[in-house]
Image (cartoon, helix red, strand yellow):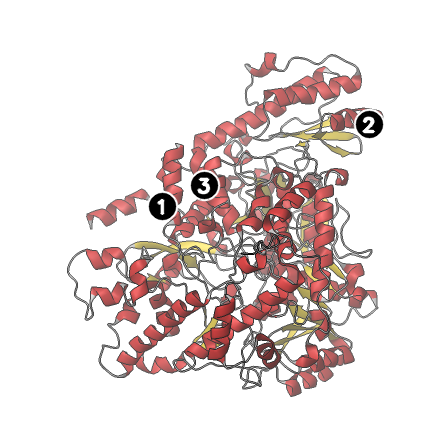
């Protein structure tokens, strides 16, 4: 036997599911002689790339991790005292290993199918409870993207809910001590909507101004100061002016919560609750408000409802957003929460409990007090009087220079502004760190430092009484019972076991691309060189990240056919907004700022029109024809009618209907003919990479869902990343940041808080591209199209396929038409719930067409898994046929009663007109690997009528047990 020394497994063969033998069998079923023939029948020849992508040669997994570690080590992780919303934290090992590094948690999808998502829904209820109780508010959502975008959502929500007395008001007052990154995001969001931002001190605020509708305070503020806003808030309320606070959850364990001062909205970041800084993200932003705003609150709210057996169960409440978003009437395009990070933060709170959290806060505060005392002893003025963790030291230019030189040598980062040095303490700092800080200043001044330990035993909280928290928080048993690691581990695992994720079976969600998140891609995320970097660290310390960004943007430019990329948008919807803001600025720069019409096909994602409205555009809908394509005649008519004011077309390609529209180049040319720009939604890029590209098709800008095509996990509903790639004429307008140079030479203001969005998860996409190479990425696209067409062929005799291309092929997804089953009372929801009994998450339900299922298998599934899924759907079709034939009851059958739980099958008498076996083992393979839903079908309407969005009171559990 000959030895082949180059016979190592390519990463591509691990990522792409089908083997050569399976490919041959699938092609035979499809009726194509080769992959090339299938692709030519699917992708219009006119838009196919003429040459392969120019990307580096694919690396083996082991080689990549070795070389990438060298890149990571170019980042110099200094001890950070920069603060300003980002702090070192100690991630509990039990949470790090069993949540962040656990595919059972990070590969789950958004909890739209609540019956198989009870674990993370409980964790999110815990998160909401933490936020509500620490902020003192009545209602909180299940996280937003970051603190700055949460503040922007507060500004726009309060603008939308203005009282009659403030109908014409458009001023939003921003305390000058708000974080600079938040000011930048507020500016981006305010200007297109006609909101006028006014900056000034708290003392200069005039709440009697008739044009003023809202105010934002930072508590503690950027200088670290805390103050009592009660009187100011009361005066504002008297004048119908709403108040919003950006705050810090750890500080609120000690400080009077904003809710007790009368706040209308409270926002912030849960980052320091056990989530690494990660050079800016991802982190769970939070948003809390009064219950009267429950139907206007952006993002997702988790609520408590009842299942079919009357048992308490969790689900997403008030679904007027996400896929049910209000489209062109929306005030927010929020589509991504930060579920994985919110889950981590909630477990951090559960693990430490209220007293543990307060101890961390007191220790952090105490270290800041010691440093302040030590520096004061050196003769410098510590301007901070009432503070939590950050002190402001007055320092002239010479002193700053001396301190900076010594601090850098000691690998310590402070924050420097004209005339001042700021020092922010956190959970990760110890007594010796406080001493080291004082020593740095002493050396700079040529003096001897005091021994801070001498004062450590006599520390007390010395804040004004009005600022000291007196109310209890986190008294629910969940925050009392899991403080030992053994109990915490069991609690995490108990919740994990309630959720179906990619570790169990394929998740075939059309347009959501639930593909493999390979372990080798995930490993670098928790390396300290990436995780422990502050987003505003000096650039000379972040050269590993700089190289990563440079390489990744170059690769994404090549993949999309564009000239430049911004990595800043930290979700797909943020990418949409960023792309439209760049287009808007392009028109303004050319003296055509009047262009404000966005043409959007009726099949578009709901976030598309919402993003257009946020960018100050007016939406004009374009019809689709009976084949699901854009109605070209209608498009041309509306483009011509709005020629003078046409700003952009928003188009998804391949279409949301799963078809490569052959007229796409003509569509783009039509928009350009009338002076508009083409924005391409990148949701379906998994069908383009290596075969065609947005630039090749004729678009001007696209966003990329890195959590779809480029393998960042969905994390149970977030994190996500939505970078935008643009043609050369749009590059000057890519978004900037007030603290780190990013974007073009004429940038729009910030889209997110951090300069590079959720930077710490970019290594995942970097790894994917580096290990796949051009050929591997192209083959992945081909396999995605092959797998989709194989499923189509297997199901076509059982379910009508709604749309196909001119040659009868689907792209990477297809739509099953289930509307005819309504005649016998079967809804598409019944099919979705019944799939749970077969061990599968439902495909996308009723989008883009009501009463349908949109299926996308991705390239990572093997033929065996595809067959298992098809067998399930065919078996369900047979169950529907039994209803159609009249052999089973229309209202009491396996579909209407699905899903079936273990307790339902094992407890009490079985009085249903079918067997237990048919209920829970409907097909042979299920017997060997059964996933049990833990609750029966949930009553969503009951949950909306009886909104409860915090931990279920223990008394209610007791009542259930007695019933």
Q: Secondary structure at mark 2?
A: helix
Q: Secondary structure at mark 3?
A: helix
Q: How busy is the neighbourhood of tag 2: few (under 14 within 10 Å), some, or many (20 plus)?
A: some
Q: How busy is the neighbourhood of tag 1: few (under 14 within 10 Å), some, or many (20 plus)?
A: few
Q: Residue lying at the far left in this picture: please name it.
A: 909
Mark 1 and mark 3 lie on one chain; the one further toward the N terminus is 3
The residue drawn where x is 24% and y is 72% is 892
The residue drawn where x is 33% and y is 58% is 929
Q: Residue lying at the far front in this picture: please name it.
A: 1
Please provide percent x and percent y for residue 221: 65, 37
Classify residue 710 as left or right of residue 21: right
Residue 494's tag is 1
122 or 843, nearer to the observer = 843
In this rendering, the label closer to the viewer, 2 or 1: 1
Residue 304 lies in what quarter of the image?
A: bottom left
Distance from label 1 to label 3 (Cα)? Answer: 13 Å
In this rendering, the label closer to the viewer, 1 or 3: 1
Is any atom of residue 244 visible in this view? yes
Please provide percent x and percent y for residue 583: 74, 66
Mark 2 and mark 1 lie on one chain; the one further toward the N terminus is 2
Residue 347's tag is 3
Label 2 sits on residue:
401
Please provide percent x and percent y for residue 768: 61, 55
408 or 811, nearer to the observer = 811
Whether the residues at callouts 1 and 3 have beta carbons within 8 Å, the answer is: no
Classify residue 508 as left or right of residue 456: left
Q: Secondary structure at mark 1?
A: helix
Q: Give the answer, above or below, for where 623 lies relative to 614.
A: below
**Count the marks: how many?**
3
Residue 526 lies in what quarter of the image?
A: top right
Distance from label 2 to label 3 (Cα)? Answer: 42 Å
């Amino acid at each position: 036997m000959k030895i082949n020394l180059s016979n190592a497994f390519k990463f591509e063969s691990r990522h792409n599911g089908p083997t050569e033998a399976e490919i041959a069998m699938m092609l035979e079923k499809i009726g194509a002689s080769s992959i090339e023939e299938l692709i030519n029948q699917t992708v219009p020849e006119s838009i196919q790339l003429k040459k392969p992508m120019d990307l580096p040669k694919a690396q083996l997994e082991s080689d990549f991790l070795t070389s990438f570690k060298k890149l990571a080590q170019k980042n110099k992780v200094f001890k950070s005292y920069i603060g300003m919303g980002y702090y070192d934290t100690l991630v509990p090992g039990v949470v790090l290993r069993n949540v962040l590094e656990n595919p059972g948690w990070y590969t789950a999808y958004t909890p739209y199918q609540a019956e198989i998502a009870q674990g993370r829904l409980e964790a999110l209820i815990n998160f909401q409870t933490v936020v509500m109780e620490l902020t003192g508010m009545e209602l909180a959502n299940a996280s937003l993207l970051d603190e700055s975008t949460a503040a922007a959502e507060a500004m726009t929500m309060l603008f939308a809910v203005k009282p009659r007395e403030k109908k014409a008001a458009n001023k939003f007052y921003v305390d000058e001590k708000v974080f600079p990154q938040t000011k930048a995001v507020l500016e981006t969001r305010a200007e297109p909507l006609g909101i006028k931002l006014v900056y000034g001190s708290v003392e200069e605020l005039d709440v009697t101004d008739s044009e003023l509708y809202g105010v934002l305070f930072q508590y503690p503020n950027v200088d670290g100061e805390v103050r009592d806003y009660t009187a100011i808030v009361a005066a504002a309320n008297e004048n119908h002016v709403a108040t919003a606070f950006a705050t810090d959850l750890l500080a609120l364990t000690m400080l009077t919560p904003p809710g007790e001062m009368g706040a209308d909205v409270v926002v912030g970041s849960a980052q320091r609750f056990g989530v690494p800084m990660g050079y800016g993200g991802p982190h769970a932003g939070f948003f809390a408000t009064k219950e009267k705003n429950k139907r206007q609150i952006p993002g997702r709210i988790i609520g408590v409802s009842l299942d079919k057996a009357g048992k308490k169960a969790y689900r997403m409440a008030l679904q007027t957003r996400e896929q049910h978003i209000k489209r062109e009437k929306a005030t927010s395009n929020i589509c991504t929460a930060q579920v994985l990070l919110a889950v981590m933060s909630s477990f951090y709170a559960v693990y430490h409990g209220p007293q543990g959290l307060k101890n961390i806060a007191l220790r952090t505060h105490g270290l800041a007090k010691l440093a302040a005392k030590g520096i004061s002893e050196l003769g410098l003025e510590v301007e901070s009087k009432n503070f939590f963790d950050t002190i402001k030291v007055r320092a002239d230019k010479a002193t700053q220079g001396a301190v900076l030189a010594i601090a850098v040598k000691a690998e310590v980062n402070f924050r420097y502004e004209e005339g001042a040095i700021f020092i922010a303490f956190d959970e990760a700092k110890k007594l010796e760190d406080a001493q080291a800080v004082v020593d740095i200043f002493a050396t700079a001044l040529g003096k001897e430092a005091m021994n801070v330990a001498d004062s450590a035993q006599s520390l007390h909280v010395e804040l004004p009484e009005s600022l000291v928290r007196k109310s209890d928080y986190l008294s629910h048993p969940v925050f009392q019972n899991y403080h030992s690691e053994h109990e915490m581990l069991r609690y995490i695992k108990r919740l994990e076991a309630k959720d179906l994720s990619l570790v169990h079976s394929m998740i075939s969600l059309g347009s959501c691309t639930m593909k493999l998140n390979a372990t080798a891609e995930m490993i670098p995320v928790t390396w300290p060189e990436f995780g422990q970097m502050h987003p505003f660290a000096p650039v000379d310390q972040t050269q590993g990240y700089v190289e990563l960004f440079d390489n990744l943007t170059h690769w994404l430019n090549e993949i999309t056919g564009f000239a430049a990329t911004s990595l800043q948008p930290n979700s797909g919807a943020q990418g949409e907004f960023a792309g439209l803001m760049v287009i808007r600025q392009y028109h303004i720069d050319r003296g055509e700022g009047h262009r404000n019409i966005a043409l959007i096909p009726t099949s578009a994602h709901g976030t598309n029109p919402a993003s257009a409205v946020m960018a100050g555009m007016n939406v004009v809908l374009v019809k689709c024809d009976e084949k699901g394509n854009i109605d070209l005649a209608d498009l041309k008519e509306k483009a011509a009618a709005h020629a003078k004011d046409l700003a952009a077309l928003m188009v998804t390609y391949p279409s949301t209907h799963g078809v490569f529209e052959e007229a796409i180049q003509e569509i783009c040319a039509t928009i350009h003919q009338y002076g508009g720009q083409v924005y391409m939604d990148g949701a379906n890029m998994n069908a383009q990479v290596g075969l065609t590209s947005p630039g090749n098709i004729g678009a001007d800008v696209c966003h990329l869902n890195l959590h779809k095509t480029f393998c960042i996990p969905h994390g149970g509903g977030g994190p996500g990343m939505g970078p935008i790639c643009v043609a050369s004429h749009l590059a000057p307008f890519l978004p900037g940041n007030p603290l780190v140079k990013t974007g073009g030479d004429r940038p729009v203001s910030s889209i997110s808080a951090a300069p590079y969005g959720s930077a710490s998860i970019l290594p995942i996409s970097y790894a994917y591209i580096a290990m796949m190479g051009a050929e591997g990425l192209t083959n992945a696209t081909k396999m995605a199209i092959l797998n989709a067409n194989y499923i189509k062929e297997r199901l076509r005799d059982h379910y009508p396929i709604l749309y196909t291309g001119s040659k009868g092929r689907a792209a990477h997804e297809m739509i099953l038409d289930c509307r005819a089953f309504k005649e016998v009372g079967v809804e598409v929801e019944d099919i979705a719930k019944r799939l749970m009994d077969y061990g599968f998450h439902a495909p996308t339900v009723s989008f883009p067409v009501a009463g349908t299922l949109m299926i996308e298998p991705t390239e990572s599934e093997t033929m065996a898994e595809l067959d298992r899924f098809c067998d399930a759907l065919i078996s369900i079709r047979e169950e529907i046929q039994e209803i159609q034939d009249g052999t089973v009851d229309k209202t009491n059958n396996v579909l209407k009663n699905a899903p079936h739980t273990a307790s339902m099958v094992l407890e009490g008498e079985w009085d249903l007109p079918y067997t237990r076996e048919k209920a829970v083992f409907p097909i042979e393979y299920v017997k060997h690997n059964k996933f049990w839903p833990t609750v029966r079908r949930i009553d969503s309407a009951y949950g909306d009528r009886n909104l409860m969005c915090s931990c279920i009171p223990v008394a209610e559990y007791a009542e259930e047990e007695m019933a």
